[in-house]
Image (cartoon, rainbow, N blue to C red):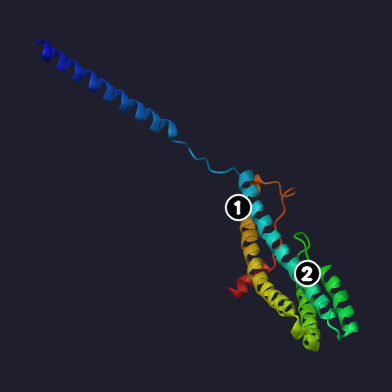
């Protein structure tokens, strides 16, 4: 009789412990459930702005490095025993002048971008010709490396600008969709590398 009572008592205690454990686990599961709130308009604007700024900084960094490589290539040409001194001086002057035309987020325009890209292409062609007309440059392997990096940067820049335009367009569309809740005097739309009308025509 005592043995039966003891066995029943142990069984009851085990069931009680198991029930408590289940309740504790359920409480923990309930505590870990978090309600994810959608970002507010100001938070969304901040998120979009951060993405745009990051994309813009990548463009400027790539473009600035390209001009640094152009300048370095001209200097490498000047290290040769025989080179076109007037050509090198002109190339360095043009490099500084064109780089000074570099755009900003606030002054982007079709005319500025066209002028900047045209002058940049002319500068690169001039420096390539200068390099090609310098015989001893073949003994300077860095010159070829710099020229290749300049060419690669030109190609990458197209993709970087397209990425920026996508983010900027998303930002502008968000402003349009929420214009009643946004102070347009404080938050302006982003300028694009490609005009919206032209983008629509191309696509």
Q: Pick out the residue farthest to the left.
A: 1
Q: Position of residue 61 (x, y in %)?
A: 72, 63
* Horizontal side, residue 181 vs residue 137: left or right: left
Q: Residues within 10 Å of mark 2 (few under 14, many from 20)?
A: some
Camera-side residue: 190 or 54? 54
- In the image, residue 182 lies at what x, y percent? 67, 46
Q: Quadrant of residue 74?
A: bottom right
**Disc 1 secondary structure class:** helix
The image shows residue 194, relative to residue 178, as above or below, that is: below
Query: 66 or 47, which lies in front?
Result: 66
Q: Is residue 202 left or right of residue 96?
A: left
Q: Residue 112: where, in percent of width, then height?
A: 79, 70
Dot 2 lies on which element? helix
Distance CA(mark 1)–CA(mark 2): 42 Å
Residue in view at x 86 percent, y 84 percent? 81
Viewer-closest of 185 and 96: 96
Question: Which of the labelled discs sits on residue 177, or is there none?
Answer: 1
Would you call the spot at circle 1 few (<14 residues within 10 Å), some (14-19), or many (20 or more)? few
**CB atoms at circles 1 and 2 under 8 Å apart?**
no
Asked whether 113 or 58 is in front, the reply is 58
The quarter of the displayed image where residue 93 is located: bottom right
What residue do we see at 11% from left, 14% from top?
A: 3
Location of residue 190 in the rendering, given as x and y in whole percent from the top left corner: 70, 58
Q: Is residue 20 above or below residue 100?
A: above
Q: Residue at x 77, y 87 (%)?
A: 132
| Residue at numbered disc 2 | 68
Reply above or below: 51 against 123: above
């Amino acid at each position: 009789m005592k043995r039966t009572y003891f066995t029943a008592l142990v069984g009851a205690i085990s069931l009680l412990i198991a029930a408590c454990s289940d309740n504790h686990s359920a409480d923990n599961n309930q505590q870990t459930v978090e309600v994810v709130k959608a970002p507010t308009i100001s938070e969304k604007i901040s998120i979009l702005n951060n993405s745009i700024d990051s994309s813009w900084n990548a463009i400027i960094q790539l473009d600035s490095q390209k001009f640094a490589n152009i300048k370095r290539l001209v200097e490498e040409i000047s290290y040769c025993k025989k080179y076109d001194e007037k050509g090198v001086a002109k190339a360095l002057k043009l490099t500084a002048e064109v780089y000074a035309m570099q755009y900003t987020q606030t002054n982007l325009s079709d005319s500025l971008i066209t002028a900047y890209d045209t002058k940049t292409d002319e500068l690169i062609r001039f420096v390539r010709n200068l390099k090609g007309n310098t015989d001893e440059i073949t003994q300077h392997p860095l010159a070829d490396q710099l020229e290749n990096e300049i060419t690669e940067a030109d190609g990458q820049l197209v993709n970087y600008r397209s990425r920026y335009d996508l983010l900027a367009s998303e930002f502008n569309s968000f402003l349009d969709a929420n214009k009643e809740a946004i102070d347009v005097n404080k938050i302006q739309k982003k300028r694009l590398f490609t005009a919206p009308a032209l983008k629509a025509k191309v696509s």
